[in-house]
Amino acid sequence: MGGCMVNAAVITVPAFAPPRSGVRHFFGTRRHSASLNIEVGAPLPVKSAEGATRSSWMLSVKQVHGTDALVVDRALTKSDRFPDGWDAVVTNQPGIMVAVRTADCVPVLIHDPQRRVVAAVHAGWRGAVAGIVRKTMTVMKSRFGSVPEHLRLSIGPSAGVCCYEVDEPVLEKLHQACPDSEQVVRSRRGSKAHLDLKLLIRQQAMAAGVCPESITSVNVCTICHEDLFFSYRREGKVIGTMVSAIGLGPL
């Protein structure tokens, strides 16, 4: 996890969003998720380090392994509800942290420092193969004028190529959607192989115009590190998820 900062609960990436950027972000661990009480589709008040409630919110929505993005372009209230399914949340509103939940899938945080827009993306293999990161960037451009050359991305902890084995149906969909798919496939054995989701997302972002030096990655595998992360693959069921989030500070 070179270049990352790890405290008892979350991982941050200073090269992605230094303090002077006015952006708050984190990739959560299993210890951090225990301290949150997120109601999916409803804003959660965010508390300061001193414990006082601030005029800010965290928003996580129902994830459906698709490619749609919810855009939040107004202030939130405690009565707001977002019951539909999305796998990315985009906002230009200071004081709102947009969040995704993962347990082997890839959390991707995006920041446009020029237009002051942020996004949180949930990318499993289905979303990654379908181009969810590129499609979220397209939403950021159409709604807020963001251009790929100005975007900064951070790819968070997820199932690593060391452990993430997939079968032929997954590989077939990958090959159909990604002409250079063999670059992200490792250790092929018959109808199974290991898939490098982080690399796939990095390649897709660069192909869409994001500068390579603007992409950071937390290169740690959620399946390997039981002490830090929940893992659907390792545990055989969802017993918990990590929360990763990004938000704009006040102007």
Image: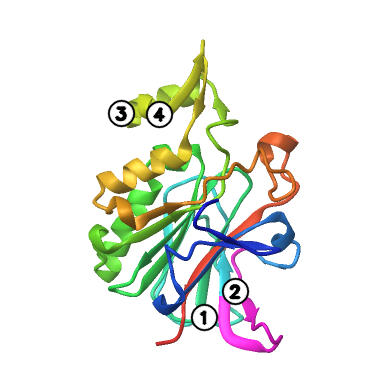
Q: Nearer the viewer, mark 2 or mark 4?
A: 4
Residue at the disc numbered 1: 76
Residue of label 2: 43
Q: Amino acid at mark 3?
A: Asp
- Mark 1 vs mark 4: which is more N-terminal? 1
Badge 1: how crowded within 10 Å, few (<14), some, or many (20+)?
some
Give neighbour class at mark 3: few <14, some 14-19, many 20+ (Cα, 10 Å). Answer: few
Under circle 3, the secondary element is loop
Given the image, on which type of amino acid does mark 4 rest?
Answer: Leu
Identify which amino acid the numbered label 1 is placed on: Leu
Mark toward the start of the polypeptide (2 vs 3) = 2
Total marks placed: 4
Give, as a single range, the part of the protein colored magenta: 40-57
| Residue 217 at x, y percent in the picture | 46, 50
- Which of label 3 and label 4 is nearer to you? 3
Of circles 1 and 3, which is in front? 3
Would you say the residues marked 2 and 1 are in contact, meaning their CB atoms lie under 8 Å apart?
A: yes
